[in-house]
Amino acid sequence: MFNARVLATVLAMTSFIYAEEVVIYSGRSRSLVAPLVKRIEAKTGVKVTMRYGKTAHLAMLLMEEGEHSPADIFWAQDAGALSALAQKGKLAPLPKSLLEKVPVAFRDSGGRWVATSGRARVLAYSKRRVDTADLPKSVFELTDPKWKGLVGWAPTNGSFQAFVTAMRAREGEEKTRKWLKAMIANGTKAYAKNTPILQALAAGEIDIGLPNHYYLLRFLASDPEFPVAQTVFQAGDIGNLVNVAGAAVRKGSKKSAAAQKVIEFLLSPEAQGYFTEKVFEYPVANGAVANKKLLPMDEMQKNAASIDLNVLKDLAGTLELMRDVGLL
Amino acid sequence: MVVGVFAPLGYLAYFALTSETGSFAFVVRAQTLTAVWNTFALAAAVLFFGTLIAAPYAFLTTRARLRGERLFVLLGALPLAIPGYVLAMVWLGIGGDYGLSQRVLGVGLWRANGFWGATLALTVYTFPYLFLNLRAALTRLDPSLAEVARSHGLRGWALWRAAILPQVRAAYLAGALLVVLHVLADFGVTSLMRFETLSFAIYRQAQGAFDRTYAAWLSLVLVGLTAVLLFVDMRFLRGRLKPVSGATIRFAPRVALGRWTAPAYLYLVGVIGFSLLVPVAALFLWASQPPEFDSVISWKHAMRNSLVLGVGAAVCAPALVLPILRVSVRREGLWARLLERIPYLGYAIPPLPLALAFVWLTLSVVPDLYQTLPLLLAALLLRFLAEAVGPIRSLLMRLPERVEEASYALGFGWLATLRRVTAPLLRRGVLIAMAFVFLAVVKELPLTLILAPNGFDTLATNVWTHMEEAHFALAAPHALAILAVAGIFVTILQFGEQEQK
């Protein structure tokens, strides 16, 4: 009797505290964002239920679920997945006030998704085996025979595929096809994802790798001796693509107000600080300052390949090309 | 269950056939043929080396006088509890310029990769299927056959071939089938070792969202290959698997090892060293490093979820398999044999298409079940039911129908017969089947990620999320927790087995 009353009181209190409740489908890994998710509940009063998975799989799941989807927010690793879902009409428009928290380059031109943090493609290399003077100036130089069998990439990785999409958009379909073919002919090794690329660099299996920027910082955080370093290609090179993780509200969600509140929190100084200080990403909200361990924000942006992130939605075309050259 | 197997197949066929032209050409390209060839080569190598390891291991732990037998049995089963991608990560981390052996011992080792890397990781990971299946058969070896053979002057190999091998053939084939199916389905190890098999190719296609056509086509190729394999296996079993008709089952005496004692222990310890101690040592080493991140993920909650799924599936699987096997073992005819093959087809459908098919099926038929625990459990059962078939079948074949008939004749009902006659005789097979299913479920990833209720985490999903971000120190405790849970479960099962003696 007593227990039942306590239970009823507790339940009443919880429903009072969490007036609203949203479900987030998160392609961002739990390992990285779980501490922040706790803060969402404390700061916004919105109760959050998380479903973690790979960005591509969750995007497929959202398509499969259609109107039955329990998801309110899709939080993706990659602008490509967001743009593709937006194109298929699965995402609801966000209010202007929310969109304007980030620079134009970091949001959907149709206003259906907004970036939450940035990540840069980099040139990672073995400290022991590569002389920095020899490093290529452009990603196109990696087809040089002197790198034969010494370069690693991750063709199944979403960030890599986004990079190929960007290359197609800026450098053209034919040039991209030629580059991919030449890279394959040059014995470029295909890894399952970014982490194994870094491990292979340390192991001496390859000399150069094309991962995202934060993996090395994570290896170095636990092992300062880790024998890998990274840099960027020359300013503007497509190899320096800056992609974003971003969030959107699912079209048909009955809790769009609460969902927007959550996304607003992800752009708050607290969350932006978390992304850059803890996760080694770049903050995207206006006025946020990047982690000191990262290449400074302005330098990163000066080097970055200029590209409209909305072009990344043509993942299908990239996969087609990659299949065509035998990379997938 | 038939619906459960064939609905996903229909779903795959639908996606494959409604695709635009040109995708079929994709399937028949040279790369696919290479992948098929690689798949067979890898399966053959893993089976070969696995047999080489498992057969002596099974013999020593059943037919020889040995101390610590139960411990060796437990340790021989545990490699099944290490997720494939963890095992591959460990072996990748050992060799090379900056590998553990270089840094800790100062010895640079070959860095596992490619065909041999995949063979190594998959062999140490799957040999328990052969070992435990063989063990189930060897413990119940009928010594009268060997006595008859000996009285006919047969010795050594000839004696084995005439009297022992026929008795363990069914168990061996069941284990071998699991090993081969496992290799066919693996993408965790093959993708990390960079060896292109068919499942790896499917996984690569499935990585790109929005286009399920290519993955669907390749999945159908894989299911087709598996169907051929199942058919061949069925031909092998045909006619050789008549249930033993002798009404009494005696246990054969154990062999004294004599001067072979030391090499035997060395062998057992060596196998355990390679398959279990090396990965566990690497996990402990990772766990001892400072955490890479402030983690808020607790293993306690995840452990409870893993246990719920593992025990739930382990209890349900034998109950589902027994009725099928009773029909297929006892009845003659094509349909009876095909019936037994159905669980294997569930094993053959790649997990990602299987999961998406389940999403589609539940949302269109019973939306209330979507993202619920029962649905996840059903999907896991469908996928791993095949693991329960072998151990139960090989014992059921030795259970003469007459024993049950006698029970009925004495006036016992079917329930009493099951409880007092059938169940005790099948116990060992059922326990091994439960262990297989449990071990498979606690490390499962793709189905759990897609079908679990929102907010539901398991030890395996936690290992994965940490490994993805190179947080090895944080991943290790969760991987070790899987091993601990598996160890406890398998130990409990072993006590059940002991009681019987």
Image (cartoon, coloured by chain):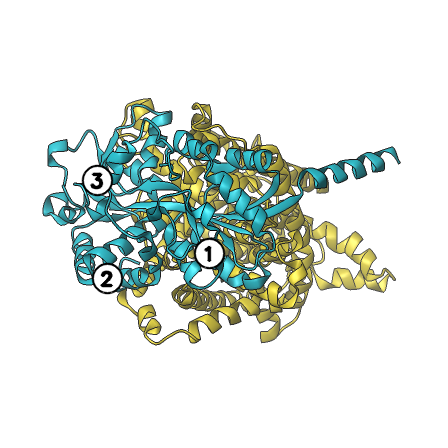
In the image, residue B341 above or below residue B69:
below
Q: Report how far apart the C-alphas of labels 3 and 2 lie in the structure.
A: 22 Å
In the image, residue B182 above or below residue B491:
below
Q: For mark 3, what is the residue?
A: A208
**Mark 3 vs mark 1: which is more N-terminal?**
1
- Under mark 3, the amino acid is Ile
What's the colour of chain B in the image?
A: yellow
| Res A173 → quadrant | bottom left
The reply to whether residue B81 is visible in this rendering is: no
Identify the disc placed on residue A59: 1
Identify the residue shown where x is 26% and y is 35%: A298
Nearer the observer, disc 2 or disc 1? 1
- Under mark 1, the amino acid is Ala
Quarter that holds the N terminus of chain A: top right
Identify the residue shown where x is 32% and y is 52%: A309
Q: Please state the horizontal and vertical placement of residue B417, each as a whole percent of the image.
A: 80, 57
**Mark 2 vs mark 1: which is more N-terminal?**
1
The reply to whether residue A141 is visible in this rendering is: yes
Identify the disc placed on residue A325: 2
